[in-house]
Amino acid sequence: MAAIPLRSSGDTQQRSADNGATAVLVFPSRSLPSKAPRLRLHLSPPSLVGGELAVLSRTLTDGWIAPAGPVPEQFEQAVGEAAGFAHTAAVASGTAALHLGYRVLGVERGDEVWTQSLTFVATIAPAVQMGARPRFLDVSAESWTLDPNLLEDQLQKAATKGRLPRAVVPVDLYGQPCDLDAILAVCGRWGVPVLCDSAEALGARYRDRPVGKGAALAAFSFNGNKIITAGGGGALVSDDPALIARARHLSTQAKETAPHYQHETTGYSYGLSSVLASVGLAQIGALDARVAERRRVFDRYAGALSDLPGLSLMPEPSWARSSRWLSVIQIDPKAFGTTREAVRRALEAAQIESRPVWKPLHMQPAFRGARFHGDGLSGRLFERGLCLPSGSMSAEEQDRVIDVIRGCCKG
Ligand SMILES: *Cc1c(COP(=O)(O)O)cnc(C)c1O
């Protein structure tokens, strides 16, 4: 794609995010008071909060560009506070944070790593690339996250065979916290560490605490499509200083303290640039407002759609306060009168992006041969589930989505 100059007239710049969601950067208008109406509505476009340029300009004026220095440190501090963890390593992506998590938990070739089947590929990709064998478990109907009862059954069986996983990785799906206390209780019985993939859930709460809190490690993402973005970035957090010190060491090429270059192991170039950390720093102050906004979007969909036969929305258990990163509906084709795919195509024809729920990993050719446990709820959610535009938008824009969906219902 040809380089597109940054313009400040309300133009949008389109690019593809890692996970297939199309992201659009909206540059606030400096000269024009009113924004041109957007034709295409995207799932989760990044939007600026307003302070980005000021922080960036201070960073550049001070001469800080490298993935080191005070700005990434300030960003780590801010992420730690927002996430409620004592120690944070800010890194280049959420996937990098997960990779470092697997390294510091000692995942090695041949080890098993267990996660829920219903998730984005990045949850497990780094572990598989390290030679670990994935095992996929189904999600529970109450939360669409890792089913703790199923986990308990399977850990029991694995323990009997002496083949416990090296790590269990629940996912806070679409911003919905997993049932972490139940998962920690089960994993704790056999000493299996928990790495929480909270990439989609910064700002969500589980019982009365921030999401992921209590796990050995949690990973966040600041990709362009996430609730807070640095334009790219991630963070690994823990309350164990040794784990984060080790992750930091590995993220900067595992250099030992010596005047020459000395390495006991190999690491990665995973540091977060000061330029991106500046953007993240400006954005993170808006976290609570962004979560409130996403929750309002979800509530508005719920109010306008839940009377339709065969249409239901993603549940939220009593112990969860989801960030509602994405609003997700389910379509029962019999009662609704048409399929999820027909609804998706109708939205597409109206210039509205929507996406099926994650295709379960046990159904992905990339993981052919991996074991799966469960009754297949993940697959049914994939068949019937649709993610709707969930970012900052006007009531009129959201009404466009609502009208198309209502128009599809033949039930
Ligand atoms: C976005 C995402 C990641 C990866 O984060 P990146 O910053 O894009 O590398 C990992 N897991 C889940 C569940 C995600 O949604």
Image (cartoon, helix red, strand yellow):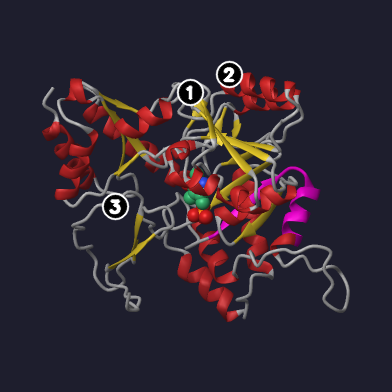
Report the disc number at residue 87: none
Q: Is residue 123 visible?
A: yes
Identify which residue, 121 or 390, lies in the foreground. 121
Residue 277 in the image: x percent, y percent? 57, 64
* Residue at horizontal 71 percent and vertical 66 percent from the top: 252
Report the disc number at residue 42: 3
Residue 271 within the segment the image draws in magenta: no
Element at label 2: helix
Q: Residues within 10 Å of mark 1 (few under 14, many from 20)?
A: some
The answer to whether 89 is drawn above or below residue 382 in the figure is below
Is the Cβ of the residue at disc 1 closer than 8 Å to that at disc 2?
yes
Residues under labels 2 and 3: Cα distance? Answer: 36 Å
Residue 109 in the image: x percent, y percent? 70, 48
Magenta-colored span: 233-249
Element at label 1: loop
Q: Is residue 308 visible?
A: no
Residues under labels 1 and 2: Cα distance? Answer: 9 Å
Identify which residue, 303 or 364, lies in the foreground. 364
Q: Residues within 10 Å of mark 2 (few under 14, many from 20)?
A: some
Which badge, 3 or 1, comes first in the chain's sequence? Answer: 3
Residue type, label 2:
Asn
Image quadrant containing the C terminus: top left
Classify residue 331 by image quadrant: top left
Q: Residue furthest front?
A: 369
Report the disc number at residue 149: 2
Q: Residues within 10 Å of mark 3 (few under 14, many from 20)?
A: many
Is the Cβ of the residue at disc 2 closer than 8 Å to that at disc 3?
no
Foreground mark, 3 or 1, reads: 1
Residue type, label 1:
Ser
Report the disc number at residue 140: 1
Q: Is residue 176 left or right of residue 124?
A: left
Is the Cβ of the residue at disc 3 closer than 8 Å to that at disc 1?
no
